[in-house]
Image: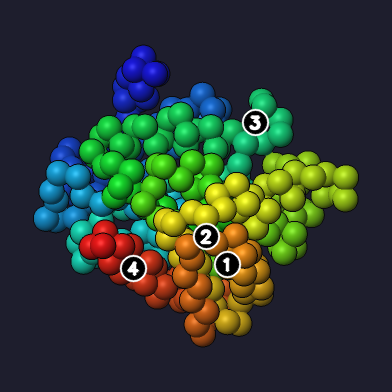
Amino acid sequence: MKTRLSLIFATIVLLLQNNLTAQERLVIESSHLKCNDTILVFTPVNVEPGNPLLYLLHGWSGSYSDWHRKTDIQALSDKYGFTIVTPDGFYNSWYLNNTDSSKMQWRKFFDKELYPMISERYGNLPVNTFITGLSMGGHGAINIFIDDTTRFRAAGSMSGVLNLHDTRLKVNQINEVLGEYTPQNLLFDNSSAINRAESIAGCTKMLLITCGAEDGLVKSSMDFAKRCRELKINNTLVISPGVHSWQYWTYIVNLHLFLFKKELEK
């Protein structure tokens, strides 16, 4: 593992200030992605050793710069005291491993490259590490949390696709990652957070599920929260006015950071 991490560190390119108290743009050459991943990192002005850290994932058709372009992430970092990491989930990765091993293996990238590198570089521990995201990123954040809950303090979803059957993109986009959408293709079931939740039954770590009441994916969030209650998984469901839009996400990300900060005070 040390050899692999050294290789990753060697491919980091700092394009902004060369310190840990400013915005940084990192580029990782990844064997699992078959390409580079660009990451923006926002560190609070009053940086301290072991600052809490949040992985913030973008949605379908987006990129690592979405959150930075749509809202003032540095201001959020300063306000809540979180180091905020926005990796590139690419246009249509769904934060999954493509069924074709010669193509993008995003989950392996996170597990074996991104998470270890960020933890070493910024000194965060699982007890103060969080993950959330919007839409496709909500799907990614909750599934990555379910993969290994020991890596995080809590996780969240904003308008998340928590059941892949709930989105029209299953036919003409997700199929590029999981294969043709047919009743025989169980990968759509097995990759959906609502079906994977059983593996963390009884989990006491917080899951924060938020969605706009007028969002076409609100059922996905409500069904997932209901499944969590059945499995006695600690979860908070917040349904508030809003549609599937940046106006909602730039509003609700404040709630995620606020409640994650409160979680640290327990």
Q: Residue 229 — which label?
A: 1
Report if the CB atoms under discs 3 and 4 are less than 8 Å apart. no
Q: Nearer the viewer, mark 4 or mark 2?
A: 2
Q: Nearer the viewer, mark 1 or mark 3?
A: 1
Residue 72 pos. (x, y %): 30, 65
Residue 42 pos. (x, y %): 27, 52
Task: Kindly tell me whether residue 15 is visible in this rendering.
Answer: no
Label 2, residues with CA under 10 Å away: few <14, some 14-19, many ≥20? many
Q: Name the kind of residue labelled 1 in the image.
A: Arg
Report if the CB atoms under discs 1 and 2 are less than 8 Å apart. yes
Give the labeled residue for mark 3: 103
Give the labeled residue for mark 2: 233
Residue 173 pos. (x, y %): 72, 51
Give the labeled residue for mark 4: 259
Q: Nearer the viewer, mark 4 or mark 1?
A: 1
Number of labels in the image equals 4
Q: In this view, which residue lies farthest toward the bottom? A: 241
Q: Nearer the viewer, residue 183 or 227?
A: 227
The residues tagged by marks 3 and 2 sit, at their Cα atoms, a distance apart of 34 Å
The residues tagged by marks 4 and 2 sit, at their Cα atoms, a distance apart of 17 Å
> Looking at the picture, does residue 231 appear above or below residue 125?
below
Identify the mark nearer the N-term, 3 or 4.
3
- What SS does tag 4 mark? helix
- Residue 225, by quadrant, is bottom right
- Applied colour scheme: rainbow
Q: Name the kind of residue labelled 4 in the image.
A: Leu
Q: Residue at x 82, y 49 (%)?
A: 181
Q: Name the kind of residue labelled 3 in the image.
A: Lys
Label 4, residues with CA under 10 Å away: few <14, some 14-19, many ≥20? some
Q: Name the kind of residue labelled 2 in the image.
A: Ile
